[in-house]
Image (cartoon, rainbow, N blue to C red):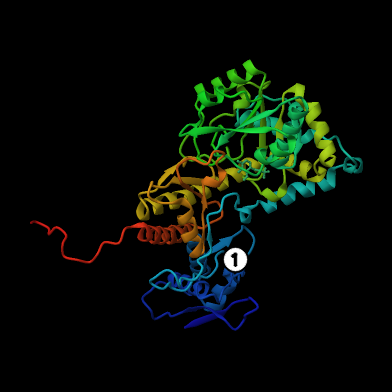
């Protein structure tokens, strides 16, 4: 029997023990020990495990045996491992087994809330290389106040990337660097309102914390335009007298539809006839799983469409890095608004991102993350199919979230509340509607959850839905007056 203790502060906790006389292979025994330690809460989230070499030496086994055990636990989502770094515990301990009623069930604390990218996968080493390059090669005078439009290196790197990958049609002089999409759309709406715009059309449902929020401040009336399975209903837009429309044409937020080529051409035609501006929010286009990428609308009409991109979904929302591709006639006014807002985005971050893009690190990061998110999405869809086939997932081919519509008899607010009582966070679609009417639905953000948590979360949701159903189902008296099978 070999044993090893953790290198964490709780050094008394036994981490691994193996029994050479047992029939079970050693790597499985090691994995089972660590898994058990995590489930029991002895190994907490973030605890680093000893190097495989140390464990192998202490247990007197080949290092490959320990590596295999660690890899198995990484695949199961219990551990995360970074090349050249520590292997750490990636999950909270599982909640104790629930009581039958569900009412006394302890909090599961699984969060399907939307909007969080997996920041634990931030490419620290590659980013650090770019920071180091910038700090060792950039002349001092570049760290003084800068042009509010951003640094030229990033304008060039972004146009190269976006024209190549997103099918945009832009020159470096069209780019304005901003602090995420949130600031970008605020700057554009501010400029358009100052130019006389009065009415803003938005997709219904759509995000309620950026364009719609800014509209109130900029004095714009908001018109909700319904969306269908293929995004915005263009015939409804054509009935409006909007001066500007905000769209998520590549992956409608939240319902996931993709605006067809014909619909895109019609939106552009409508805008050009009215002298309106189209704001394209290209927030998650990089993550595409089952179909070819859909190009940006900006490439079809660079004088009518302002394109907005963000690093929030691809790298980290905390970077606050975003970019606009604006028609020449809007660039100066947007830049002036940016200067008024904050005198320009941080120069070291911009130069770092430019270097990161130019080295091909951004492409590499996306290639690495796409299969990770895809596996999480697949786990979610498989769990929903198995446990809740009555929910209908839509817009699943891309992004970091999925929406499922609810059957008519399930009240959205009741499902969300029943889930919350079990420690499961899942948002309803209704709060994002402009007009209150519409199907109930749930939004599942899956970007930060391990496959195991996703499966567990769907299990908890199934339980919550069963409770809601039981409450609304009329009570049938327990008499023998019902029909008898075969009679
Ligand atoms: C529809 C939509 N657009 C854009 C963003 C990104 O916003 P920002 O770049 O300000 O972080 C998000 C983030 O969740 C989003 O949901």
Quadrant assignment for ligand 1: top right
**Which of the two residues, 33 or 112, is positioned nearer the viewer here?**
112
Q: Position of residue 359 (x, y in %)?
A: 69, 40
Q: Residue at x 61, y 58 (%)?
A: 82
Q: Residue at x 38, y 72 (%)?
A: 100
Q: Is mark 1 within 8 Å of ligand 1?
A: no
Residue tagged 1: 88
Mark yes or no: residue 293 visible: no
Q: Residue at x 78, y 28 (%)?
A: 194
Mark yes or no: residue 244 visible: yes
Q: Residues within 10 Å of mark 1 (few under 14, many from 20)?
A: many
Q: Position of residue 190 (x, y in %)?
A: 75, 33
Q: Residue at x 68, y 20 (%)?
A: 303
Relative height, residue 484 to residue 397 (above, below): below
Relative height, residue 456 to residue 11 (above, below): above
Furthest residue toward top: 273
Q: Position of residue 18 (x, y in %)?
A: 46, 78
Image quarter in which the C terminus is found: bottom left
């Amino acid at each position: 029997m070999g044993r090893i203790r953790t290198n964490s502060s709780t050094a008394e906790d036994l981490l691994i023990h193996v029994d050479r006389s047992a029939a079970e292979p050693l790597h499985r025994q090691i994995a089972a020990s660590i898994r058990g330690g995590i489930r029991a809460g002895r190994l907490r989230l973030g605890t680093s495990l000893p190097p495989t070499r140390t464990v192998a030496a202490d247990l007197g086994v080949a290092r490959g045996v320990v590596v295999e055990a660690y890899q198995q636990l990484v695949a199961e989502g219990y551990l995360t491992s970074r090349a050249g770094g520590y292997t750490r515990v990636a999950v909270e301990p599982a909640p104790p087994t629930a009581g039958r009623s569900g009412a006394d069930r302890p909090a599961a604390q699984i969060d399907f809330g939307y909007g969080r990218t997996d920041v634990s996968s931030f490419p620290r080493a590659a980013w650090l290389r770019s920071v180091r390059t910038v700090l060792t090669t950039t002349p001092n005078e570049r760290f003084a106040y800068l042009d509010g439009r951003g640094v030229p290196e990033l304008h060039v790197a972004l146009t190269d990337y976006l024209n190549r990958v997103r099918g945009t049609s832009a020159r470096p002089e069209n780019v304005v660097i901003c602090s995420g999409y949130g600031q970008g759309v605020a700057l554009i709406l501010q400029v358009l309102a100052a130019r006389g715009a009065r009415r803003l059309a938005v997709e219904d449902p759509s995000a309620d914390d950026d364009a719609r929020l800014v509209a109130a401040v900029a004095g714009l009336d908001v018109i909700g335009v319904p969306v269908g399975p293929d995004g915005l209903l263009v015939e409804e837009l054509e009935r409006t007298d909007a001066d500007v429309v905000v769209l998520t044409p590549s992956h409608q937020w939240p319902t996931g539809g993709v605006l067809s080529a014909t619909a895109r051409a019609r939106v552009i035609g409508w805008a050009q006839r009215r002298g309106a501006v189209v704001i394209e929010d290209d927030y998650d286009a990089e993550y595409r799983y089952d179909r070819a990428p859909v190009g940006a609308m900006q490439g079809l009409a660079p004088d009518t469409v302002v394109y907005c991109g963000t690093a929030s979904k691809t790298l980290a929302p905390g970077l606050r890095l975003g970019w606009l591709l604006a028609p020449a006639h809007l660039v100066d006014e947007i830049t002036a608004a940016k200067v008024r807002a904050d005198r320009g985005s941080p120069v070291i971050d911009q130069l770092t991102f430019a270097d990161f893009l130019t080295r091909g690190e951004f492409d590499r990061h996306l290639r690495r993350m796409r299969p990770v998110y895809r596996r999480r999405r697949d786990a979610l869809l498989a769990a929903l199919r198995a446990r809740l086939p009555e929910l209908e997932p839509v817009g699943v081919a891309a992004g970091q979230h999925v929406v499922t519509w609810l059957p008519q008899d399930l009240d959205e607010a009741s499902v969300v509340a029943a889930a919350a009582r079990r420690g499961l966070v899942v948002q309803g679609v209704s709060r994002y509607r402009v007009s209150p009417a519409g199907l109930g639905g749930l939004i599942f953000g899956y970007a930060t959850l391990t496959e195991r948590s996703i499966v567990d979360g769907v299990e908890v949701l199934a339980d919550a839905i069963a409770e809601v159903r039981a409450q609304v189902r009329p009570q049938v008296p327990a008499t023998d007056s019902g029909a008898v099978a075969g009679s």
